[in-house]
Amino acid sequence: MTNSSRPVAVFDLDNTLADTAHRQRFLEAEPRDWNAFFAAAPQDPPLAEGVALALRSAEECEIVYLTGRPARCRRDTLDWLAAHGLPEGRLYMRANGDRRPARLTKLEILRELADGREVRVLVDDDELVCQDAERAGFTVLRARWAAPSAALKDAQEREGRT
Ligand SMILES: [Mg+2]
């Protein structure tokens, strides 16, 4: 059972906690190879800054993971979180086949979480997600510790794929 009196700290996964650089080549291919991109996610190295922040946040907050990865990656993602010592927390993923931009799907979940709870912070590397969350009144911390990927960004915003 979660203790609903605790505030929530919401963490993105790709390029916030997990370094996707080694699999971005699958998105730079023509056509993009989404299956290979997601299949390689278990090999992502953790991003030390993000992991440290999640561990610190867990002292006061309930941790929630909010990712654009599709639901079919749930098992791999939970295993990865546990393998790298991340705090336990609910994992919200994109429904299989949901191609809406990340900023829409994520804001929807943030609003659900904020209904009756304090959402203390959203930690995410996606500038459009961050902007929309701030505009909606959420406190945002921009994860700037991973190398930006033009291919991934384009995929998140235009294709609604991650
Ligand atoms: Mg991200």
Image (cartoon, grey):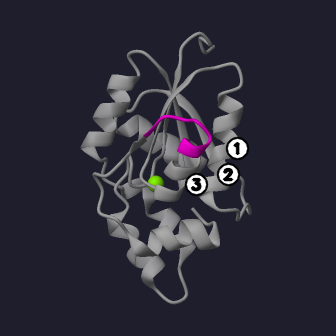
Q: Secondary structure at mark 1?
A: helix
Q: From mark 1 to mark 2, how far is it between C-alphas?
A: 5 Å
Tag 1 and tag 2, C-beta contact below 8 Å: yes
Query: Label 2 amino acid?
Result: Thr
In the drawing, what numbered circle is on residue 108? 1
When the figure is inspected, residue 76 is found, relative to residue 98, above or below; the finding is above
**Residue 70 appears in the figure:** no
Tag 2 and tag 3, C-beta contact below 8 Å: yes
Q: Position of residue 49 (x, y in %)?
A: 26, 41
Residue 30 or residue 129, whichever sits in front = 129
Query: Which residue has dot 2 on it?
Result: 105
Query: Which residue has dot 3 on it?
Result: 68
Binning the other alpha carbons within 10 Å of mark 1 as few (below 14), some (14 to 19) or many (20 upward) gives: few
Residue range in magenta is: 134-140
Q: Any atom of ligand 1 within 8 Å of the CB at mark 3? A: yes
Dividing the picture into quadrants, the one containing residue 50 is top left
Q: Position of residue 85 (x, y in %)?
A: 35, 32
